[in-house]
Amino acid sequence: MSEKEVNVILVGAKSIGQYGGYESFINKLLEYHKDEENLHYYVYCKANGSGCMDIGKLPGAKAVNETEFIYIAGGKGTFSINTNFYHVSKGDILIVEKGAIHSLISDKDAPLDCWTCAAYDYKLCDRIYVGFMLPANVCPHMKAGIHEPLIQSIFHELNLLRTFPSNTRISTSDILGTALVNIYYEIFRENPTMERRKDSSFAQNILIYVNENYNKKITLKLLSEHFHISADYISHEFRKIYGISPINYVIDRRLNDAKWLLINTDKSLVSISEKVGYENTSYFSKLFEKRIHYSPLEFREKYKK
């Protein structure tokens, strides 16, 4: 293979872990190209709900929980975000909120040139980012307009940074990324386009609350008391939008965090159990084994680097 860096994107409609053929295919690719330092695979598949991806099945896999800021530098095509479709062309920008199911279809006669910056844990110019950038009824697709040259310039600089030493790259990319995020925020704030969406702002509020409190005690009864809405309505709205019940989402979030801690730290089982929200380590271990099909310690032994 040449010195040129090659990025390969694989998109799977089904999950890794429950569909052995897909998992085996990816494992074979990784094994075959393990010595090719310039070759990078990016594998996308379902991350929540029924048939979700089990990140423990592939070492190095992770659930993406970042907001994506997209700029269309050329070409045209169709971009889907959850159940909504947007026709895009040069000069368009999009914000894909974390957890959104999204994909693009490029026009065969005018292929898309699509630039993306993923960001998390950032601050906006006039408020601290706490969950989602856009209200649920604001269209996530707009024209860059007079801001396009600056957006182009930032993406160009971010691309150049990949050749810099890691310490310089990280600090500079944080500055550029923050600038880009705030430009996008200002564009959408100044001229928001309202749309009729199937997304529920109420379900989004529940998701924000759960993500901020998932390691504390959460039950449907407590959610009902917090939001002053019936437990049945909360469960129905959340499942309608995200394809999973609120409580199962909490469990998945906790266990995904536990898997990361098992692989990437030497913390004790008691410490990990408490950190992700389970005071009873025995209960945590049984739940982990039931869902992941390995005990926590077996999982650590199998996947820890």
Image: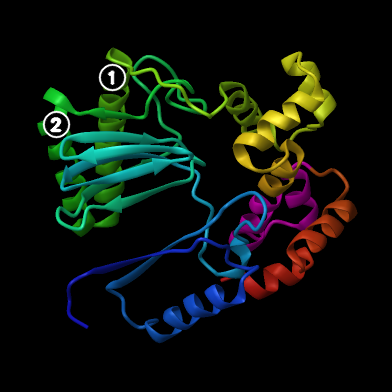
Q: Quadrant of residue 133?
A: top left
Q: Percent from the top left, x then y, of residue 194?
A: 38, 17
Q: Could you tell me if residue 304 is visible in this image?
A: no
Q: Is residue 216 magenta?
A: no
Q: Is residue 273 magenta?
A: yes
| Element on which disc 2 rests | helix
User: Which residue has dot 2 on it?
Assistant: 148
Q: Percent from the top left, x then y, of residue 35?
A: 35, 83
Quarter of the image for the N terminus: give it.
bottom left
Magenta part mainly helix, strand or loop?
A: helix
Q: Is residue 169 left or right of residue 2?
A: right
Q: Do the CB atoms of the residues marked 1 and 2 lie less than 8 Å apart?
A: no
Residue at x 55%, y 74% (from the top left corner): 23
Residue at x 58%, y 63% (from the top left corner): 15
> Which amino acid, mark 2?
Glu
Colour scheme in use: rainbow
Residue at x 72%, y 31% (from the top left corner): 236
The magenta span reads 255-277
Q: Is residue 59 left or right of residue 31?
A: right
Q: Percent from the top left, x then y, of residue 93?
A: 26, 34
Q: Earlier in the sequence, mark 1 or mark 2?
A: 2
Q: Could you tell me if residue 176 is visible in this image?
A: yes
Q: Is residue 237 above or below residue 67?
A: above
* Label 1 CA crowd tier, 10 Å (few <14, some 14–19, many 20+): some
Cα distance in 3D space between marks 1 and 2: 13 Å
Q: Is residue 34 above or below residue 228?
A: below
Q: Is residue 17 above or below residue 35?
A: above
User: Which residue has dot 1 on it?
Assistant: 186
Q: Percent from the top left, x then y, of residue 178?
A: 30, 32
| Element on which disc 1 rests | helix
Front residue of this view, candidates 261 and 23: 23
